[in-house]
Amino acid sequence: MASPLSSYTHPLTAAQAEQLRQVLERDGFEFKDKPHTLFAAAGEKLSIAVYEKGPKVLVQGKRTEEFVRFTLEPEVLGEAKLGYEEELNPEMFEPHFGIDESGKGDFFGPLVIAGAYTDRETARALLDAGVADSKKIADGKIKKLAAMIRRAPGLDHEVIMVGPKKYNELYGKIGNLNKLLAWGHATVIERLCEKRPDCGRALSDQFANPSRLRAALGERGRGITLQQRTKAESDVAVAAASILARDKFVWWIEGASEKFGLTIPKGASGAVRRAAGELVERHGVGVLEAVAKTHFKTASEWL
């Protein structure tokens, strides 16, 4: 039996955010200060935050599903989606592979490509568990969801991690990130085809011309329908793949931080550059080949 929904997020317009504020005031929610939010409020067994970025609403607590179904959707969003995913997006419940990656925009760490096979039963189970695009989920919850996905009956998955040293070697030969991504996505699809030869469709986020990925597919993969689209993470199979990929990427970052006695930051910010400088100072410039993607501009200061 699926666990009750305890977390829900959805983008809002500025007008919808204001409408939600009025609804919460009317219903006696207690407002409180919270960083990076337009407002945050709490009620019985429920907390609601509307974040500046987006904006988007995050609903959490035991009454999440009740609030979304009977208040947020009819009074603010003006549409009923929760529980109607099969009617609104029937293709998502058909058997298919979802493919996604993590780490391509991060200076430190590996490139991870993952894939997941879902059908009607597993898609519903994942949605009920709160599986969504990994970029919308905190790392702590990513770990729990990834463990659940790996254990889910009937859900085959595949994960490829290209560590920095191998990544730099491959990038040196290929010279193009999209070609490297096409190779990784194609490899995951081929391996999933071995496990599920009856599956006829694969969906991934669009990172380049679809012909590039199709050209990289092997004999098994060439027989399936290949789809690429922007925001493919709205599909639950792709979302599951994104969580598996992110979990492996975070695992690597945590291990490297422990190994070098230094917090290895994600992304490509000023903190990343400072960490790179400290690593070079401690271990020499050669360390970057082992921990970072050296074609990034960040590395040009030392290489």
Image: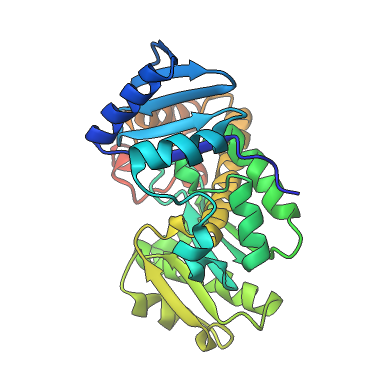
Residue 126 left/right relative to 148: left
Q: Quadrant of the C terminus?
A: top left
Q: Which residue is at a point 48% across and 38% down the rendered structure image?
A: 70
Q: Position of residue 121 (x, y in %)?
A: 67, 64
Q: Which residue is at a point 50% across and 22% down the rendered structure image?
A: 47
Q: Residue furthest left?
A: 15
Residue 50 left/right relative to 138: left
In this orientation, which residue lies closer to the viewer: 302 or 117?
117
Residue 63 left/right relative to 235: right
In this orientation, which residue lies closer to the viewer: 5 or 185?
5
Q: Position of residue 232 (x, y in %)?
A: 42, 60
In this orientation, which residue lies closer to the viewer: 76 or 270?
76
Vertical arrangement, residue 105 with respect to residue 100, above or below: above
Q: Which residue is at a point 56% across and 82% down the rendered structure image?
A: 200
- Asked where in the image residue 226 lies, by quadrant, the reply is bottom left
Vertical arrangement, residue 100 with respect to residue 253, above or below: below
- Asked if residue 239 shows in the view, the reply is yes
In this orientation, which residue lies closer to the viewer: 236 or 150?
236
- Asked where in the image residue 152 lies, by quadrant, the reply is bottom right
Q: Which residue is at a point 66% across and 61% down the rendered structure image?
A: 122
Q: Position of residue 48 (x, y in %)?
A: 45, 25
